[in-house]
Amino acid sequence: MMENAQIKPAEGLDLYERMLRIRLLSEHILEVYRDDVMETPVHLTLGQEAVAVGVCAHLRDEDVLSLGHRTHAGALAKGLPLKSLLAELYGRSTGCSGSYGGSMHVYDPEHGIHGSSAIVGGNIALGVGAALSFKLQSKEGVAVSMFGDGACDAGVFWESMNYAALAGLPVLFLLEDNQLSNVMPKSKHLYPDPRAIAANFMPTYFADGTDAISVFLSAKEAISEIRRTGRPAFLHCPTKRWMKHQGVEEEDLPFIHIDREKDCPIQKLESFLLGARMATPGELKQVRAHLEEELEAAIHYARQSPYPPVQALEV
Amino acid sequence: MMENAQIKPAEGLDLYERMLRIRLLSEHILEVYRDDVMETPVHLTLGQEAVAVGVCAHLRDEDVLSLGHRTHAGALAKGLPLKSLLAELYGRSTGCSGSYGGSMHVYDPEHGIHGSSAIVGGNIALGVGAALSFKLQSKEGVAVSMFGDGACDAGVFWESMNYAALAGLPVLFLLEDNQLSNVMPKSKHLYPDPRAIAANFMPTYFADGTDAISVFLSAKEAISEIRRTGRPAFLHCPTKRWMKHQGVEEEDLPFIHIDREKDCPIQKLESFLLGARMATPGELKQVRAHLEEELEAAIHYARQSPYPPVQALEV
Amino acid sequence: MPWSRFEKQWSIQEEGRILSYKDALREAIDQAMCLDPKVFAIGLDADDCYGVYGSMLNLSHPERVLGTPISENAMTGVALGAALTGMRPIHIHMRVDFLPVAMDQITNYVSKWKAMFGGKPKVPLVIRAVVGRGWGCGAQHSQTLHGMFAHLPGLSVVTPATPRDAKGLLLQAIALDEPVLFLEHRWLYKNEGAVPEEMYTIPLGKGQYLRRGDSLTIVAPSLAAIHSLQACEEHDLDVDLIDPRTIKPLDRELILDSVRRTGRLLVVDYDSPVCGFASEVLALVAEEAPEALLAGAQKMTFPDVPMPASGVLERRYYPDPDRIAAKAKAMISRVKGEGALV
Amino acid sequence: MPWSRFEKQWSIQEEGRILSYKDALREAIDQAMCLDPKVFAIGLDADDCYGVYGSMLNLSHPERVLGTPISENAMTGVALGAALTGMRPIHIHMRVDFLPVAMDQITNYVSKWKAMFGGKPKVPLVIRAVVGRGWGCGAQHSQTLHGMFAHLPGLSVVTPATPRDAKGLLLQAIALDEPVLFLEHRWLYKNEGAVPEEMYTIPLGKGQYLRRGDSLTIVAPSLAAIHSLQACEEHDLDVDLIDPRTIKPLDRELILDSVRRTGRLLVVDYDSPVCGFASEVLALVAEEAPEALLAGAQKMTFPDVPMPASGVLERRYYPDPDRIAAKAKAMISRVKGEGALV
Ligand SMILES: Cc1ncc(C[n+]2csc(CCOP(=O)(O)OP(=O)(O)O)c2C)c(N)n1
Ligand SMILES: Cc1ncc(C[n+]2csc(CCOP(=O)(O)OP(=O)(O)O)c2C)c(N)n1
Ligand SMILES: [Mg+2]
Ligand SMILES: [Mg+2]
């Protein structure tokens, strides 16, 4: 945990709000998923909220976030409205992708989300393409390609870093490293240290991916460096996945130890904010209350929304 | 140039013979190619003979060599009979690939050549697969994946190194680095130093790719390490391409300086062998005379051979 | 994802030892591994505790099941390299949607290798991949693509519909010295049927009748074959139902014989319509037996759009037994009622 | 490689400004770049001194032509990412054979992106690739593959045969907010024909007659269209020759109209036969106008094997005007002489 001088109270509260929003969504999914009201495979982000939130705190709406299959945290952190995401999960035509995408495919160009992909790895290149777009248009933006340790196995990871470095593009390679590809530990699927590799292409940064402040501070450095130089950077955030790769069950894997109190990014941030007197318990409660209301409204919105018309598929 | 103690006269002469065979083939192609008697695109290996020869000197017939589009040096160095290769270039059914392959696709499983490929990069994985085969069959062999600097751009290079390292496979990644991908200099297509990258996966070795002795000695170390540990290694051999990427023309690229005397692997080896008194001028002449005869016979063989029957394509 | 909802929808009523499609696959792999030490399996998550939807669990030689990184392209090259040097790999993919990642190897290497070297190499490589419709997976996790693969010269494309065929065709694929793409539909995994215990092979290029009738020929592979059979049984349709079993090579004679007799053709193909299997069958008949087509020929496929995620759309996207039956009835009655369409 | 031998085999005799196919492509790109600063070109060796067989040389905006590493897969993703964020990329490949390397992006990303997000995204991405038969290149450097790509929902496949179409279709492809695969046959590059100087577009899905006649309909795209036209001219055949211009979308009505009139169909397609364009056209007619097929329908394609390298085989592998003419004559005379094939 870094010194509090580096983060302002408003920033801390903002991180808290964004993380908690994601957490509440996960909890809602846990609650209803077994009733089959959400017909879409979910990759929950429980325990991993800090990574997306700590990074997105430094992004503007125009900045681009390119996501893979595990979308919820990144999408909400970047600004995709909760109700749009919920409606998508409920398969309604008001969903962010008109119900054509489901959990793995979110879309909100107004907030810099130009789609996400469930084929591991390829979305990294899309982020690089967005960065190329900024450069060609002499725009100021930054693109973030967010991916897991498993995606580092894929050749497209290598190719994307090489091109971003050659072309000099403003893109952050954000490795959300939960040390798992499905049930495979990282040691079994990725031989080298990805950060050491990345260092051959660009400056690299590190943060504790279960600690929003740590991510916030490293991301701040990395992103301001990108904005300054127009060149790529790499941010490595080890974190922990609490649930099965997909679905709503917990999973105990022998090689991953999880302490759901100590490892919880939200509890960590709470103690930090309270300890540093950057927020009072009352303020935090208020945030939660406000988010719970927002969630209720979003659920209502989603459930009231119509299903898409099947005529769309008639030839 | 290393000390001569490390190489025996017979070994030196063997290197010389193999390199000269390749060179004479190139010269024959230069002579006849404009007459359209060889209907196949040729990627000449003029100036690059030392790499394949220095490495293959340590390989047995059973060891595997996986080649890309630039096949001639590797194929001959590994033992593919000259007449088979020539017949293939002349499009005859006695060619090593029955005339179905052409210059880029050579086949000689008896000498560990299980095919070669013109789509850049993929052959690297095939070499790794051959190494897996050795391991699964508890055989002693070594596989060599030979590729250029351009192939390092491709994701399959990365994926192949990762799997070879994870699985612990006896494969040599042999980078024949002519610093060009077609007319693109390496600085334009490959950002990092590939050897530095490879070092994250396996031990790396270096040799002057225009110097057969240098390659011979480094390859000896690398390959004996692979045989000892059963694990992969990487050998980086910078060299120089004398001709256009493809075809029989010379090309002057501003960023590559070539001195066809000083850079010539064959002249280098000649001076070494003579200087170290490992061979006499007469012996070298004899080698050449013998090879010229061999080439004449091979040309005759190829030209006398029948074209393949077109009926093979009738449905 | 409640697979239980649609798994084991339908089973063949047969004499003999009853096995699920999944267990038939498992048995084929196990027996092949026991018979030949050169057979091994390799694939992303192939060695994990879920064992590719159960099809790889409890094998006699777990040491010959290798996991891989998420590197489908290189791993296909690795499998090919192993096949060329004495092994008989089975490369496994949990979803057919991951095969495009390996398409360079499949298109340019695997399927060309034998011909590119004058027919000399042996390429005993099986690529297994699961077609995985379902539960709002969306466009990238619900593809079939057998039409795309069948376009490639040099690659056989096998699509077993029954447990018996799953075992016999997989053993055949493993036994061959040529590359075979073996596509299993996830919805067939729990279906049951009689499967001989001993090893046996079913040749590629031999289709079979799943039902005999005179008014209409239905050609349908994989899950579409089972759905068509359900349609025929539940609606008592007078249909000659052909399961080609392999998309490529295709049992042309079987199809032509039937169509010449019934004079009407419906191809039910759970894949995209353009340049796919359904078109291929219609083209075959157009070329070889146009006179048999006067009473009508139709395709029933996915619409020509990517699969949407929402359940209501997903259910509409895939044909099903009732819609197949409705289409078949319309074709039969139209013909019977109004004469040929001339 | 003596391209000169087979380049400029044939040119259209027309009024107007004469341009080569290659220069028509170049002009389209140049005009598009001048019109819209968002248009840029990217591709391996696209920016080198050879300029993609000359089609990229002397552009007004060379700074908008970007070279790339040998990373076709990631670069397709990069191009898509740029297309989604305001640019209009033209991604260029010197050979269509390199596209399978990018197949994950093409199959799972590019062609699905619009539908996967409810039709909302604009995807103004053109992928240009050159079909490169010739000179013993062998199996990996001579593929066509348009049948494979046409199978994918969400992707248009464009195959111009004439200089005029090359320009008009390329401008149309660049103008569209949907992904287009633009396949140019290398043997067409030096062919010449009249090409308007101003910018114009030709809509996708609109074929054209290259010749009118009554005895047989030939449908042939790309180089096959030109070879068919040569066949008809040199042998004075009574043929309705249709160049579909785009494989997908397909001008179904144009083909059906013609076949209904001529009663006979030959599809000449320089691609593999199975699940390809030739089968698609036959299937269309089988479904929509079977009565018109009684006099015979045939495909003329590559044999279903990979391309061999040896010149003698390569020349046999590709159909040519003489063989097309022979086939067409046989079909016409058979019909005329012996009546329908019933
Ligand atoms: C190309 C490809 N291969 C396999 C899969 C199946 N798959 C989905 S997610 C996943 C694990 C990804 O791990 P990682 O990238 O670390 O992301 P995480 O799930 O841990 O967030 C796998 C193997 C896929 N979607 N795409
Ligand atoms: C996937 C792919 N993209 C492009 C090409 C065209 N191409 C053939 S060789 C070559 C350059 C390869 O450079 P390198 O790997 O360094 O080998 P070198 O020719 O220098 O020996 C290129 C781009 C190809 N064959 N395959
Ligand atoms: Mg992970
Ligand atoms: Mg090179």
Image: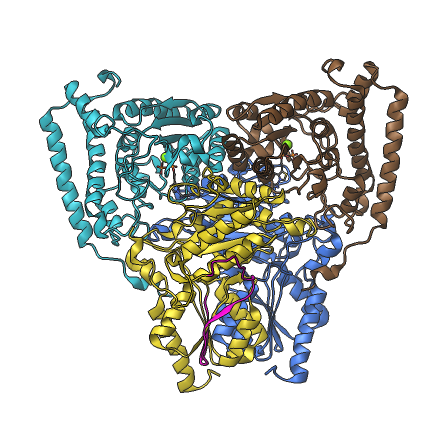
Chain colours: A cyan, B brown, C yellow, D blue
Horizontally, residue A130 falls left or right of residue D342, namely: left
Q: Where residue C316 sits in the image (x, y, percent)? A: 33, 62
| Front-most of residues B217 and D84 | B217
- Work out whether residue C20 can be spotted: yes
Q: Where residue D287 sits in the image (x, y, percent)? A: 48, 73
Horizontally, residue D203 falls left or right of residue A227, namely: right
Horizontally, residue A281 falls left or right of residue D82, namely: left
Q: Assess whether residue D127 is covered by the magenta stretch.
A: no
- Work out whether residue D128 can be spotted: no
Q: Quadrant of the N terminus of chain A?
A: top left
Q: How many marks?
A: 0
From what the image shows, is residue C142 above or below residue D224? above
From what the image shows, is residue D53 above or below residue C229? above
Q: Assess whether residue C207 is covered by the magenta stretch.
A: yes
Q: Quadrant of residue B179?
A: top right
Please tell me whether the stretch drawn in magenta is mainly helix, strand or loop: loop
Q: Where residue B302 sits in the image (x, y, percent)? A: 82, 46
Q: Quadrant of residue B29?
A: top right
From what the image shows, is residue C331 above or below residue D246? below
Q: Where residue A44 sits in the image (x, y, percent)? A: 28, 40
- What are the residue bounds of the magenta stretch? C196-220
Q: Quadrant of the C terminus of chain A?
A: bottom left
Residue ID at (44%, 56%)? C24
